[in-house]
Image (cartoon, rainbow, N blue to C red):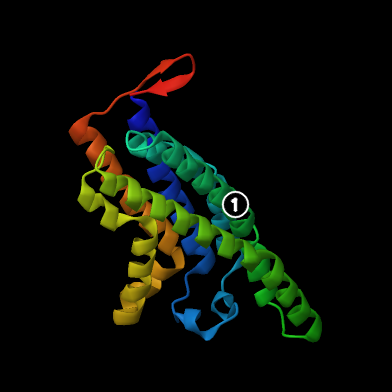
């Protein structure tokens, strides 16, 4: 199978599997996401969070393969910048694996009666793991900047309009949907990053099937 297709499918699969896992971990029918803290996790049962945990962790391992797909698609514009996007994106998702692997544990804490000890553990969790989420956001922003810059150079496998479907802009769009249409947004916002990358990889695969780019391996190096 063409490496463009294979890696694109792996990225798309990652967005679906991790999205399903994160939805199980985070979805709150009351949409208490704007209240701050982890109150939106109250009432989520252990079976749901356990399934979400394993889907999220194992699915996230496929995201670096998806990042390699983006590298291949961006490479004609600048091998160095495209490879930087691959490294930055992969690092972000590796940190993201650690973060999503912690969510079932904080969810379990939120089912316990409030106490000084529980509050202290939640504060410690916030310091240790929510900091990792900020790292994921920064790497996604950097990946998006490189994505936009290279596409506007006009030498990638993407048309220039694809720049408007960069991950960070799509994540912002998910939050806007939540603000404008909360009943729809409450389903999208908890999995905003995965929704963004689902759209990116879907459009990217469309471009692959349309334009049929290909590479061959010469001395271990991908050649256009």
SS of the residue under disc 1: helix
Quarter of the picture containing the C terminus is top left
Residue 211 figure quarter: top left
What is the x, y in percent for residue 78? 38, 37
Q: Nearer the viewer, residue 191 or 47?
A: 191
Q: Can you identify the residue that label 1 sits on? A: 97
Q: How many marks on residues?
A: 1
Left or right? Give the position of 161 relative to 216: left
> In x, y percent, where is residue 198?
36, 52
| Residue situated furthest right in the rendering | 117
User: Could one spot residue 29 in this view of the protein?
Assistant: yes
Q: Is residue 29 left or right of residue 88?
A: left
Residue lying farthest to the top in this orientation:
219
Task: Say above or below: 24 vs 158.
Answer: below
Query: Does 135 appear above or below 208?
Result: below
Residue 108 rendering spot, x and y as whole percentages: 67, 69
Instruction: Work out whether residue 59 can be spotted.
Output: no
Residue 215, by quadrant, is top left
The residue lying toward the viewer, choosing from 74 and 77, is: 77
Specify whether 3 is left or right of 203: right
**Image quadrant containing the N terminus:** top left
Which residue is at 44% across, 51% downward? Answer: 143
């Amino acid at each position: 199978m063409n490496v463009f297709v294979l890696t694109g499918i792996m990225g798309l699969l990652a967005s679906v599997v991790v999205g399903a896992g994160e939805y199980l971990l985070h979805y709150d029918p009351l949409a208490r996401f704007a209240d701050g803290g982890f109150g939106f996790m109250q009432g989520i049962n252990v079976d749901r969070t356990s399934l979400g945990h394993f889907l999220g962790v194992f699915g996230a391992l496929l995201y670096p393969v998806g990042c390699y797909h983006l590298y291949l698609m961006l490479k004609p514009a600048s091998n160095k910048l495209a490879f930087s996007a691959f490294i930055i994106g992969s690092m972000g998702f590796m940190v993201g694996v650690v973060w999503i692997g912690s969510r079932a544990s904080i969810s379990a804490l939120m089912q316990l009666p409030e106490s000084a000890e529980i509050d202290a553990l939640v504060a410690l969790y916030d310091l240790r793991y929510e900091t990792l989420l900020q790292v994921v956001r920064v790497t996604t922003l950097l990946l998006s900047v490189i994505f936009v810059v290279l596409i506007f150079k006009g030498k990638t496998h993407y048309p220039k309009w694809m720049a408007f479907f960069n991950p960070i802009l799509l994540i912002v769009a998910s939050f806007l949907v939540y603000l404008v249409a909360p009943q729809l947004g409450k389903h999208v916002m908890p999995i905003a990053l995965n929704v963004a990358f689902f759209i990116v990889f879907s459009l990217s695969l469309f471009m692959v099937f349309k334009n049929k780019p290909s590479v061959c391996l010469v001395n271990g190096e991908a050649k256009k």
